[in-house]
Image (cartoon, rainbow, N blue to C red):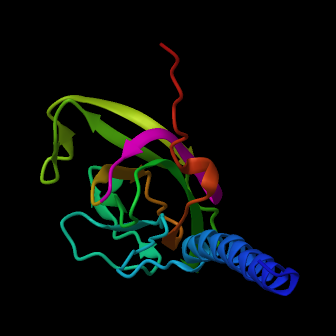
Amino acid sequence: MSRRRWKSAVCRALVLLLSFIWSSIWISGSNASAVVMGRFEGSQSITAAAWAVVANGRNQPVTTTPYVLVWSVTGGTAYDYLQFRNIGTISIQGFSVTITQVRLTGNANPREIFFERCDGGSWNVATHTCSGSISVLGRATDGLLTFANFAIGVGSFLEIRARTMPNAQSTFETTLATEITRAHIRIAEIRHS
């Protein structure tokens, strides 16, 4: 074999070897590229949690406007029955209510309002009695009142009776505006076994 043929054969062998090495690198590189360039086709939805509580009259349609108490005076005491309803998408552990009393007539100060729950029973709105036991959840004249440690599921409600002594010297319009913050959202529990 002549030297020239031998050089040509070596060159061809080197070219083949380099081609083989290059194609191996390129093929493995393109596989890696395929992973990087791969894509998912389909749909995925993301929802955000929403929390909201509203006050509305007992068995009345839900509205998001502040609730104006409608007092029913019986035997020297004024009553109103209402619900605080969770209209959010997650359970809550409490809420706050801003109470505003506006004097419509007269010059007397507003009376304290008691917010009560009928535990283990239900309210009889005709006789203003509870078939279980009555617990006072809070009381206020004006300002912010916080109801805490009440688990209210989505779509559920807390039924309350508002009670006050009517004022013979003045009339008032009482408005309840609800508010909920992150502090009222149930914190997840972590348990170790």
Residue 159 picture location, percent across and down: 29, 51
Identify the residue at image location x=43%, y=58%: 166
* Residue in view at x 34 percent, y 65 percent: 71
- Name which residue lies at 47% across and 76% down: 66
Q: Which is more toward the observer, 187 or 112? A: 187
Q: Position of residue 127 (x, y in %)?
A: 14, 47
Part of the protein shown in magenta: 140-154
Magenta stretch contains residue 144: yes
- Dominant secondary structure of the magenta stretch? strand
Compared to 127, does 191 lie above or below?
Answer: above
Looking at the image, is 190 positioned above or below residue 28? above
Residue 72 drawn above or below residue 20 = above
Q: Is residue 160 visible?
A: yes
108 left or right, relative to 22:
left
Residue 43: name its quadrant.
bottom left
Name which residue lies at 72% across and 75% down.
13
Residue 47 lies within the magenta run: no
Residue 76 visible, this orientation: no
Position of residue 49 measured from the top left corner of the image (x, y, whole percent):
48, 64
* In front of the other: 123 or 153: 153
Assign the N terminus to one quadrant of the image: bottom right
- Identify the residue at the far top of this view: 193
Q: Quadrant of residue 15?
A: bottom right
Q: Nearer the viewer, residue 43 or 192?
A: 43
